[in-house]
Image (tube, grey):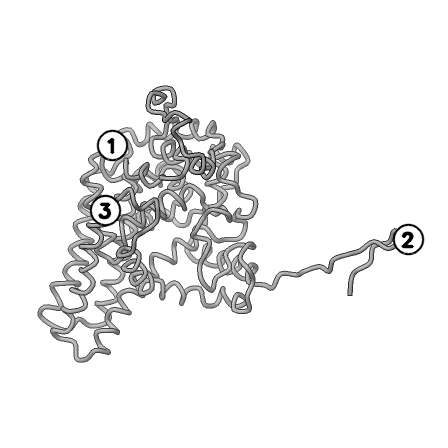
Amino acid sequence: INAEYGACNGQDGTTVYNSYHRRAFPHDRYTQYLVPDKLVDPDVRSKIEPNGQDFSLYWRVAKEVEPIVAATKGFAPNIYFVKVLLILLLAFGLDFVYPLFDRRPLWLTAVLGWSFGLIGLNIQHDANHGAVSRNPLINRILGLTQDYIGGSSLMWIVHHNTIHHVHCNDVERDGDLIVPTLRLCEKTEWQMPHVFQQMYFVLLEMAFGPVHVVRTVIDIWSDGSRREHAFAEFRKTSRVLSFVYPLRFAILFLHCTSWWDVVTQMCVMNAVGGGYLAFFFLLSHNFVGVKKDGIDTLKDCFVRNQAETSSNVGYEILCQFNGGLNYQIEHHLFPRIHHSYYPKIAPIVRKMLEAEKIQYIHFPTIWANFHSCFSHLGDLGKKPITTAPTTTTTAGKKQKKD
């Protein structure tokens, strides 16, 4: 959990602390650690935006949820580790064992890519949120599966946990709203291709895997941002694990028939894995009725900010495949509660939010969620209608400029 606070370097950490501990930050107990104002660089202080969100409703919801997760204090139940073992055996067997003896058929390569998606949703995601175990070493080890599948646990903690989660759909602060060739909010300048974005976004998500792997390698071997400088050891580990991909590439040459065959294998694997991950992430925060423009994640109600920028889809079976990411509302409110609890706490969360007139959207099927996302992207893809500026004549009548 300390990694989360380190990732807040240069940012108010109130939201991270509150949502991870499900209790208020004990300011009075930490006054002795405050740095005297005269020792604080004025430039640094001026860049930190204070968090003025209202957490009063959140404490009430957390109190109602707590008895349900009390058995494990919100961490993973023992049966979860059976799922972890099965997913990792499937992935490693297809990734490094099968290619040693024979050429892997493309359909099995697609299964391998799907297993990477399962790792991303079911294992690394919980682990890098600190939700698997109270033991940070277990979380760290399982969190490194993000590096194994071609991502970076360091980049995930910094960009996903402390930026996207804290500033979900805030058009001024959430970097996940900036996607090349997609217009996910009105702030993004409209371009002609956006007219068709609801048609091509699935293909774009399949391209996410290969592109993400290349960008991750570049980021890991660069100097990194100021926030990432607090994780020198994390960066060293990620750099070592970045060699897994060249090894994976080399093993394929044992039985593949050509360079083209190897490239095809890698592209299929990354397209399926990356597409599976990106598909559900995009659907959960982009749908008809979602709140974006006007959301300010440094003020107003924390629960409203998180719930009205997210949606749920499906039920417990999908939860087991998607690591609870189909319960995005519960996940954004309680990122350090293990996903196995989300179907159990969802009815309580929904009842309390609806009583407060807070939007709570739960799609019964993936198709319903997809259809809503399709419509939402179509609306954002339309060319904005601009009105001509007006002038006032001497007669006091307004006229449009030519």
Quarter placement of the C terminus: bottom right
Q: Nearer the viewer, residue 296 or 8?
A: 8
- According to the image, label 1 marks what residue? 72
Q: Is residue 336 left or right of residue 134?
A: right
Q: Residues within 10 Å of mark 1 (few under 14, many from 20)?
A: some
> Residues under labels 2 and 1: Cα distance?
75 Å
Tell me residue 330's x, y (percent). 39, 40
- According to the image, label 3 marks what residue? 234
Residue drawn at point x = 62 percent, y = 61 percent: 384
Tell me residue 8's x, y (percent). 36, 39
> Where is residue 345, by image quadrant?
top left
Task: Give residue 395's mark.
Answer: 2
Q: Nearer the viewer, residue 46 or 184?
A: 46
Quarter placement of the N terminus: top left
**Is disc 3 in contact with disc 1, using a CB cutoff of under 8 Å?**
no
Tell me residue 140's x, y (percent). 21, 43
Tell me residue 236's x, y (percent). 20, 50
Residue type, numbered disc 1: Thr
- Vertical side of 313 occupied by 78: above or below: above
> Residues under labels 3 and 2: Cα distance?
70 Å
Q: Is residue 233 left or right of residue 352?
A: left
Q: Residues within 10 Å of mark 2 (few under 14, many from 20)?
A: few
Which sits earlier in the primary sequence, circle 3 or circle 1? Answer: 1
